[in-house]
Amino acid sequence: MSNLIGDIAEQRFIYDAISKGLEPLKPCRSGLPYDLVLNGRKVQVKSSSTTHTRKLTNSWSKGYRQSDVDFFAIWIRDIEKWLFIPWGIKSVCIPSQIKGRGKYSANIDNWKLFGQ
């Protein structure tokens, strides 16, 4: 189920980016540390809900290297919004961001981070 939710989140990111006039690129091969490229920025797509703290690690529970990813795009399913987090953050408390008390609250649906 986890892979299915991740696939849906990736497709939603592509749809939302295109609807905003952006042109996301999806690599032809799997196994890369990022899912998409948007305006030259490598994006790793994650999915969460408003009640969780989301760990931003790869499948081996290690942090991503700076060369791996520029942004995490977290699809918050239950409110249908994106939270964009720059590389270097190991986890993010979703409830704090939604309530406007988090360091990255301004990054909710802020597509300007990608040149929009």
Image (cartoon, rainbow, N blue to C red):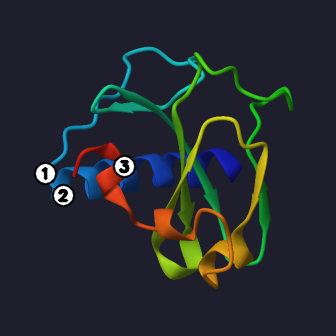
Residue at the image position 38 percent from the left and 56 percent from the top: 12
The residue to which callout 1 is attached is 21
Task: Give percent across and percent down for residue 111.
Answer: 33, 56
Name, please, the residue furthest toward the bottom. 99
Spatial separation of the CA atoms under disc 3 and disc 2? 13 Å
Q: Secondary structure at mark 3?
A: helix
Residue at the image position 78 percent from the left and 69 percent from the top: 52
- Give the residue type at disc 1: Gly
Spatial separation of the CA atoms under disc 2 and disc 1? 4 Å
Which of pointers 3 and 2 lies earlier in the amino acid sequence?
A: 2
Select label 1 or label 3 by which is in front: 3
The residue to which callout 3 is attached is 113
Task: Give percent across and percent down for residue 108.
Answer: 48, 68
Q: Secondary structure at mark 1?
A: loop
Using the image, determine if residue 54 lies above or below residue 45: below
Q: Residues within 10 Å of mark 2 (few under 14, many from 20)?
A: few
Contact flag, marks 2 and 1 (Cβ < 8 Å): yes
Residue at the image position 31 percent from the left and 47 percent from the top: 14
Task: Give percent across and percent down for residue 49.
Answer: 67, 72
Contact flag, marks 3 and 2 (Cβ < 8 Å): no
Q: Residues within 10 Å of mark 1 (few under 14, many from 20)?
A: few
Select label 3 or label 2 by which is in front: 3
The residue to which callout 2 is attached is 20
For residue 46, side relative to residue 106 (left or right): right
Which of pointers 1 and 3 lies earlier in the amino acid sequence?
A: 1
